[in-house]
């Protein structure tokens, strides 16, 4: 992992509980957003992406081992803190702690890449193998329908695609930290951070996210 360009400390945010999730106490988490570059020359991969985590505080210190993937935009948060009597825990943040947490998160992040050499396709960073396999099957189907795969060579290509998808773990040396943003967020016990659901509640109705 190459040296970090910068780590910005963000103002503390307070996340009021969602509808039906009233809470009398709020717990501190570190909200961490990282801008990363992943380069794997042998597979012609050079991609940039955002990776976000939320790290709970345990006994006043961030518990990196308990970090969860976090969608920072799934709920609104206002700058500020809950009243002292509503805080379940203590949280402090400075440059040294932010650097320690970011380094610890990246040290434990081992994304996978998948490749179909026969189709010339490589997965997105962290794309599940099954999702990539379905994408390969869709591309293969289009090629067959378009007449691009015919004769013995076409049969051999179809068999090769179906039989083999390569997988490799991205090594730390291939990951460059371009920037990071770290801030404390207070969450209700029943409304803690995580990934956005596949379906979003909007104005009392469920709408599928596209």
Image (cartoon, helix red, strand yellow):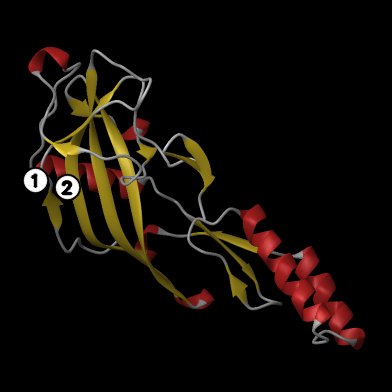
Q: What element carries label 1?
A: helix
The answer to whether residue 204 is above or below residue 196 is above
Measuring from the top left, give residue 9's x and y in whole percent. 11, 47
Toward the viewer: 149 or 175? Answer: 149
Measuring from the top left, give residue 182's x and y in whole percent. 19, 46
Residue 115: which numbered mark, if any? Answer: none
Q: Quadrant of residue 26?
A: top left
Q: Mark 2 points at which residue?
A: 99
| Residues at circles 2 and 1 in contact by the CB criterion of under 8 Å | yes
Q: Residue at x 52, y 56 (%)?
A: 210
Q: Which residue is drawn at 60% across and 60% down?
A: 167
Say few, some or many: other residues with alpha carbon within 10 Å of mark 1 (under 14 / 14 to 19 / 20 or more).
few
Question: Alpha carbon of mark 2 to alpha carbon of mark 1: how far?
Answer: 6 Å
The answer to whether residue 23 is above or below residue 104 is above
Q: Mark 1 points at which residue?
A: 95
Q: In which quarter of the image is residue 187?
A: top left
Q: In which quarter of the image is the N terminus?
A: bottom left
Seen from this angle, which residue lies furthest right?
A: 151
């Amino acid at each position: 992992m190459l040296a970090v360009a910068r780590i910005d400390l963000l103002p503390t945010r307070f996340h009021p509980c969602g509808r039906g999730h009233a809470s009398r106490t709020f717990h501190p988490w570190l909200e961490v957003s990282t801008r990363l570059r992943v380069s794997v020359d042998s597979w012609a991969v050079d991609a940039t992406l955002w990776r976000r985590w939320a790290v709970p505080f345990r006994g006043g210190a961030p518990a990196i081992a308990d970090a969860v993937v976090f969608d920072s935009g799934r709920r609104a948060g206002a700058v500020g803190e809950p009243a002292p009597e509503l805080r379940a825990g203590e949280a402090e943040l400075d440059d040294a702690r932010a650097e320690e947490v970011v380094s610890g998160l990246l040290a434990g992040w081992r994304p996978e890449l998948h490749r179909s050499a026969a189709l010339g396709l490589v997965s997105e960073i962290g794309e599940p193998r099954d999702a990539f396999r379905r994408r390969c099957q869709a591309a293969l189907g289009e090629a067959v329908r378009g007449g691009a795969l015919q004769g013995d060579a076409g049969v051999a290509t179809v068999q090769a695609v179906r039989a083999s998808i390569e997988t490799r773990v991205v090594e730390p040396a291939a990951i460059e930290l371009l920037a990071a943003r770290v801030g404390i967020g207070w969450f209700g016990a029943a409304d803690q951070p995580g990934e956005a659901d596949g379906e979003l509640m909007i104005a009392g109705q469920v709408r599928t996210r596209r």
